[in-house]
Amino acid sequence: MDLKDIKAIIDLMKKNSVTEFELEKQDFKIRLKRGSNGSGAIATYDDTPTLMAGQVLAAMPVAGSAPQIAAPVTNEQEIKSPMIGTFYRAPSPESAAYIEVGSEVNPETVVCIIEAMKVMNEIKAEAKGVVTQVMVENAKPVEFGQPLFKIRPS
Amino acid sequence: MFEKVLVANRGEIAVRIIRACKELNIRTVAIYSEADANSMHVQIADEAICIGTAPASNSYLRIDRIISAAEITDVDAIHPGYGFLAENAHFADVCESCNIRFIGPNSRAMNSLEDKAVSRALAKKADVPTPPGSEGVVDSEQDALVVAKRIGYPVIIKAIAGGGGRGMRVAHNDISLVKGYYTARGEAEKAFGNSGVYVEKFIENPHHVEFQILGDNKGHIIHLGERDCSIQRRNQKVVEESPSPLLDNPKFRKLREKMGKAAIKIAEAANYTNAGTVEFIVDAEGRYYFLEVNKRIQVEHPITEEVTGIDLVRYQIMLAMGEPLRHSQSDIQLKGHAIECRINAEDPFDEFRPSPGRIEMYYQPGGRGVRVDSHAYAGYTIPSAYDSMIGKLITFGKDRREAMDKMSRALSEYMITGIKTTISFQQAILQDPNFRRGVYSTAFVEQLLSGARRELIEVKA
């Protein structure tokens, strides 16, 4: 078998999409195997798979800890936490709470304390209206963006 | 033993860290920005705290908010991942002063390696070769010219606080040096808040070879072999593999041992603890030069895990808990071959423009020797506020040939619709004859994209 014959076999293999060829004679054995980089074709993924055509897998359910966007009820507004820490309704355990349901607030009114790293941060309402709901229990941790109070703007 | 760990990161690395914690029975706290409310790391953590709006400067970079979150969830330690605050010595200090363990190198080591100029000096003292260059920061264009004359062109001007391949300018003569000096300084000031630059000999088309190191707090340091990260596009890594085909070349047989020893010498000089990576460049003649130390777990850590059989993130947590290293250098053996392809939400047919948006269909490859580290899922919307990497595809085989064949097979199975990805670009790399022969340098991607092989990347309509 000379090079011309081997080339002819390789061409035949390519033409007929044969991957492996082995020939054994009395004093001679040859094995040809086509590598995966022979054809230069980039396997594409646009062949529509048999199961999924047109279907979209269900999205992962969102865990409960993500902030819920409350459905707007009439024209109520939320005061959201600008930081992470522990929420306190009053300046000290003995004092009265800063605000209650029914309290009137204006932008400069301090509505609560959020404590982080031993620093007590006074949180302002930054809105004008009447408090309709207190959404967090005293001494509970709050995250960024968490709704603290609902107010009816005036 | 840590009972609870806060993961100060997002995306695939946050998922990776949470997995390692779960396997150690450690409870996990995820932090997230409003843009990441539906992100996978938030779903699988035991607790999750929203820490701000989408921009990293309002969330993942906010030390005060992260510490507050750590406080209200009462964690024992924080794992910073990579990027963001991972190499921020001040953040490590704040953690320590709040009695929270920082899962990473000690702050003294971070300061000894605080910037590239300081690290260069440390390497020189440790008798490790560095590219010829300036002693430290170059303060004027005159000084830059003097250094360039001494070491000879071409040179590269680098920001000392630079990273991710940014803040660099190459100069081939005095005119471009002066121009590059001022441009690099301006860019560095804007991007890193530090205009300090130094000048180094520019080694053309080097190979990027890095060594993974681990150190305990008793001073024991080992390396876990090398990774070849020369396949880069615009100085961003695209494909990584371990071991390096360059170091397997019989001509460079001794390099692996020499570079490994050099990596340990530098780590010891810096009193390094926990996980890190020592980066070198190697020129065509087999001369190696120290570049810098990455003081964090790296994106491409999985390929080292596959060839050594060692869980690096688990090791980080154990070392941070005060455990000693359980392996000596002679215990470390590299078996088989691993390759990683980074999958980015970018359009390779449109200058790699980022492609954020909603993933419609997602099917990730599997089978023997295939690993996917990703936070992506069908229905997930990739936010535009962060980097475009959506996952890493890693294959492991008994030799390089098998790892490559599996990678091509896995890439062809990987189905992501709704956004553009670099999967077809990766396939073109895997099928390139030079890549397959293991003959490539950092010039590889440039040559691939500009050459006649472009048609190989085109997806058949």
Image (cartoon, helix red, strand yellow):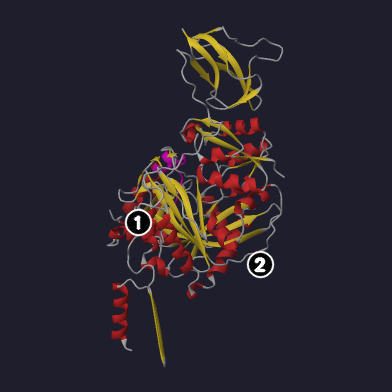
In the image, what residue occupies the spot 45% across and 12% down?
A74
Q: Quadrant of the N terminus of chain B?
A: top right
Q: Nearer the viewer, residue B87 or B430?
A: B430
Residue B58 in the image, given as x and y percentages of width and height: 49, 31
Tell me: A92 left or right of B79: right
Q: Residues within 10 Å of mark 1 (few under 14, many from 20)?
A: some
The spot of residue B27 in percent (x, y) is 65, 40
The numbered mark at residue A44 is 1
Residue B89 vertical position relative to residue B123 in the rendered view, above or below: above
Q: Which amino acid is tagged 1?
A: Thr
Q: Nearer the viewer, residue B409 or B273?
A: B409
Q: Nearer the viewer, mark 2 or mark 1?
A: 1
Using the image as rendered, state which of residue B68 and residue B195 is in the foreground.
B68
Give the structural element (helix, strand or loop) at label 1. Answer: loop
Q: Magenta segment: does it hold B191? A: yes
Does B35 lie within the magenta span? no
Report the residue marked by disc 2. B330
Report the magenta residues as a range: B187-198
Image quarter for residue A17? bottom left
Where is residue B179? Give x, y as percent. Answer: 33, 48
In terms of image quadrants, where is residue B77?
top right
Q: CA distance from mark 2 to mark 1?
A: 44 Å
| Chain ID, mark 1 | A
